[in-house]
Amino acid sequence: MQIDLSGKVAIVTGGARDIGRAIVLKLVESGASVVINYHSSAAAANALVAEITGSGGRAIAVQADVSTGAGATTLIEATRAAFGDSIHVLVNNAGGLLARKKLAEMDEAFWDQVMALNLKSVFLVTQAALPHLGEGSAIVNIASLAARDGGGGGGLAYSAAKGAVLTLTRGLSKELAPRRIRVNCVSPGMIDTTFHDTFTSAEVRKMVASRTSIGREGTPEDVANAVLFLASDASAYITGESMEINGGLWFT
């Protein structure tokens, strides 16, 4: 299937590394102009922009903490300044585990930080982008298999936040339906990223991969392909859905 996003403007939060980077490249390959949001990965974001523009694509990098209202506003205003007032694709990818902590080990500040990064950011960026999302626009949120199975040890706050992203996706799909804006999400399982390099042992990764029907970890490109589909008119009759990208590890 050939997907053409020529003339479209897309935003990818957390777009400098891993899954975000793969999504950015898929969108650019399909002709979109892409805004790469990052918080602290300046070198990776700027290198990605150079790679894209060096190949004739259109992209900018925007530093903004999208877990804050000010950061979300900064991101949208920078997008408008670079590519105009219309936003056609919004991918809410920013998120992270931060640390593995069980309930007794968490304090309120940690809980709030995880919720802000993984859930509040989706609310804030979507709200800031909404005036510039026209009929036919697509929002794709990144949830997680953890939203379905509660996550691994010490992943309580993260899995709770991602579960809320699933519910937010469904609610937004109804609320924005009169404006013909589609809202979907993808829920990755075990994907070969720095997330699992940091937080998951090699033994656990090998065990989880062996339990999948496919027999391997997923790649960022596996997730990006699904996001590209949901961002395009190829999925014009799909909204409020979660696409599970887990190699058959979990069925809904």
Image (cartoon, rainbow, N blue to C red):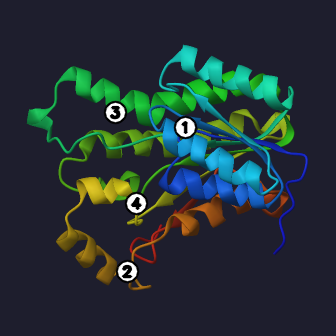
The residue carrying mark 1 is 168
Identify the residue at horizontal 41%, vertical 27% (top origin): 116
Q: Residue 237: in sight, yes or no?
A: no
The residue carrying mark 2 is 212
The residue carrying mark 3 is 114
**Tag 3 or tag 1, which sits nearer the N-term?**
3
As shown in the figure, which amino acid type bears the numbered disc 4? Thr
Give the answer, above or below, for where 1 lies relative to 154: below
Residue 179 horizontal/vertical position (percent): 84, 34
Residue 230 found in image quarter = bottom right
Give the answer, above or below, for where 215 lies relative to 54: below
As shown in the figure, which amino acid type bears the numbered disc 3? Val
Q: Residue 189 carries which label?
A: none
In front of the other: 185 or 177: 185
Q: Left or right of 33: which side holds 248?
A: left
Identify the residue at horizontal 48%, vertical 50% (top origin): 143
Secondary structure beneath dot 4 equals: loop
Q: Left or right of 30: which side holds 103?
A: left
**Tag 1 or tag 2, which sits nearer the N-term?**
1
Residue 235 horizontal/vertical position (percent): 77, 61
Q: Residue 193 carries which label?
A: 4
As shown in the figure, which amino acid type bears the numbered disc 1? Leu
Secondary structure beneath dot 3 equals: helix
